[in-house]
Image (cartoon, grey):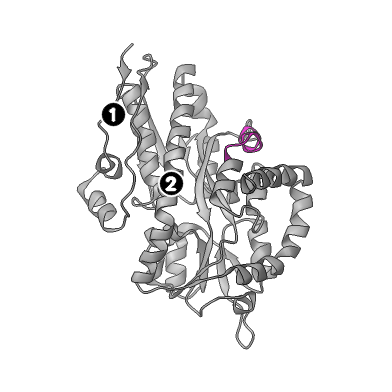
Amino acid sequence: MMLIRRSTLTLAGVASLTLGVALAAQAQSPDLSDPPAIDGEVVGDHGSHTLRMGIGLAETSPQYLSSQYFGEILSQRTEGRITVNIFPNSQLGDDVQMMEMLQTGTLDLSYPSSSPAVTYVPELAAFDLPFLLPTREAAVAVMQSDVAQSMLDAFDGTGIKALTFSENGYRQLSNSARPVASPEDVAGLDVRGLTVRTMENPVHLAIWQTLGANPTPMAFGELFSAMEQGVVDGQENPWSTILTSNFHEVQDYGSETRHVYTPFIMMMSERTWDRLAPEYQALVQEAARQSAEYEIQLATEYDDWSRDQLEERGMQITRLDDEQIAAFQEAVQPVYEEWAPRIGEELIGDIQAIVESVMND
């Protein structure tokens, strides 16, 4: 068998399918790490497959760049017999719609946030509990644990093959109404509470209801126009998503709340998975994990840079100190008390044990 020792793949090769994408990435990207070398044997010939992958984010996002790396691994190690065509920017639908397409086999791959996937695996709601994962190191340790693997395995039989977790990131609040430095700013004292777009997730709804906002579930692809038209005041997403989606064009204020850390889940249709030979299945799983590691690295590099870029582009960002964060933690404690037992005390305890181990290391 032929052994691939070193890929000649560069960041430009990963980041661009066209010159236009490359220029966009250059204009709106930090100095990102190159993708790792593609090592490993070329696998046997088990036929050709062209896979369609739908994602929610833009071509400049870590999600997109790592998805291209995923496709490069499959292409190189099958000598082009597996090809991945990526459709970014919610072209094929929102996360919920694309997961439904996976079930029916009309889409091969998708990369949703964990939050709308709680419909299939309720235990995933653990990631939506406010302030459960205090640092990225703790979050990554949880995502790479046996606890997380059991969540991925729980998709079996749903029509979806869950391959791996990667980073969506810490969610931050943005809005067009006013600076937010406290729960009172969300609720409004002499003015109405903020109307905040959320994902279709009951824990997220509970968080913003408890803070005195008016949470409004909405598909991500509809969000920019809704904010532009004043249908909602704001939204909450990681800084990188806020930047690559150009939300600063319609949002004047940002607050570094870090209220929830959510992962992405790379998924494949079970129908597609079952059509693949076992050697191809093993390669897909390996490529998913390798590209997820790269996505986490890119997301880490993107995070603070994106916040700074948003400020340079006119967004007024409030960096909350420990005392201000503690005020938000106290305000949403009823959400934790309501939902932790419903999600599972043993599961939450296992996650807390991993977090404590990382924090004390």
Question: Residue 15 location in percent, x, y?
Answer: 29, 44
Q: Residue 55 carries which label?
A: 2
Q: Give the range drawn in magenta.
A: 143-153
Going by the image, does 141 lie left or right of 245?
right
- The reply to whether dot 2 and dot 1 touch (C-beta < 8 Å) is no
In the image, residue 336 above or below residue 146: below
Is residue 148 shown in magenta? yes
Q: How far apart are marks 2 and 1 (CA)?
A: 25 Å
Quarter in which the N terminus is drawn: top left
* Quarter of image, res 50: top left
Going by the image, does 16 lie left or right of 138?
left
Q: Is residue 87 visible to us here?
A: no
Question: Residue 92 location in percent, x, y?
Answer: 42, 47
Q: Residues within 10 Å of mark 1 (few under 14, many from 20)?
A: some
Q: Residue 7 carries which label?
A: 1
Quarter in which the C terminus is drawn: top right
The kind of secondary structure element at disc 1 is loop
Closer-to-camera residue (173/205): 173
Question: Residue 62 location in percent, x, y?
Answer: 40, 48
Is residue 203 shown in magenta? no
Amino acid under disc 2: Ile
Q: Is residue 154 visible to us here?
A: yes
Name which residue lies at 66% across and 71% down.
Answer: 327
